[in-house]
Amino acid sequence: MKFVDSASIFVQAGDGGKGCVSFRREKFVPKGGPDGGDGGRGGHVWLRTNRQLTTLLDFKYKKKYIAVRGVHGQGARKTGRDGADIIIAVPCGTIVRNGETNEIIADLTGEDQEIMIARGGKGGRGNQHFATPTRQAPRYAEPGQKGELMMLNMELKLMADVGLVGFPNAGKSTLISVISAAKPKIADYPFTTLVPNLGIVRYEDYKSFVMADIPGIIEGAAEGKGLGLQFLRHIERTKILAILISADSPDIADEYRTILGELEKFEPALLDKPRMVVVTKMDIATEELEIPTLEEGVKVLSISAVSGHGLKELKDELWREVSGRIRAAEPQDESLE
């Protein structure tokens, strides 16, 4: 499936139905009173998250969502039927902005989270509501109100627990293909990964976490070089960053500093996330390789996705970090204190 992480759509709620002008017409009641029914409400437009979706691709092909009008009122005080609502499914992690002001309307991160994005117009009142002692036969009913309409700009930030960051050919795609069910394109040249990939990493006893592999960043990515700027936002929601550096790097420490610099220029808050360094491709490492101590408190692990070296230790460490963050974010039950 093609990955699309931004889209613009037009939404319009349904107009309310018209109120009815009607009078009772019954045998032996030659001058029956007003009995015009109310119009039905126009259909609302809702957005609802669906965890099965991982892209905004559908909105590249359908850009207009218009709900139906409420049914007009009828005689005998019959109210028109409300227009059917439209429910638009979006991926978890979708940010919705007003297309004119760019103001954020909603940040939809929860599963089955929904928001009414355009309210349907109220139905008009029938002439039964306008009878007075001095005007007993009103020939007037309200028109239905107009439904709300607007342009929406949507941006997707993937929901993942672990974000893989590194230069092109650092082994991110190989790693995610080995420890999850994701099957990204893998080849021995830069920028094989052109779009983010999500993979579910199964852990012991039915545990799992989600890993995101984004296209490799290069020096200058924060200024728009390469593909980094386009996709760095997909690691903003992750709980932990795994910085991958190939064992054949000419200077592991310098590459690490460069990656941190690009992350900081793009979004300084990214450096506040817990992180670890993963030295990959140990199967091609030379005997002279010395893995430096990079930062106090930052773990450095070495792996080979080809031979399997260090993969269990990596999964153990990632699970400890992810599960710890999940527990820390959970509300505490004060009754237990």
Image: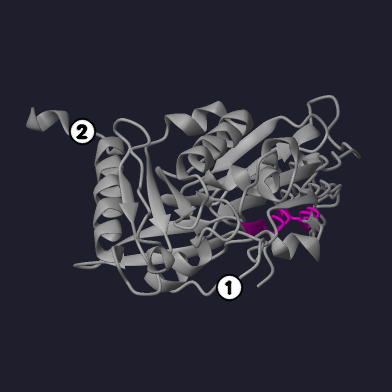
- Label drawn at residue 186: 1
Q: Which residue is mark 2?
A: 332
Mark nearest the camera among 2 and 1 is 1
Residue 134 seen in the figure: yes
Q: Is residue 69 magenta?
A: yes
**N-terminal of the two: label 2 or label 1?**
1
Q: Position of residue 71 (x, y in %)?
A: 78, 57
Q: Residue furthest left?
A: 337
Nearer to me, 284 or 180? 284
Point 65% across, 58% down: residue: 88
Point 60% across, 35% down: residue: 262
Residue type at numbered disc 1: Ile
Where's the C terminus, which quadrant? top left
Residue type at numbered disc 2: Gln
Where's the N terminus, which quadrant? bottom right
Point 62% across, 29% down: residue: 265
- The residues colored magenta run 67-89
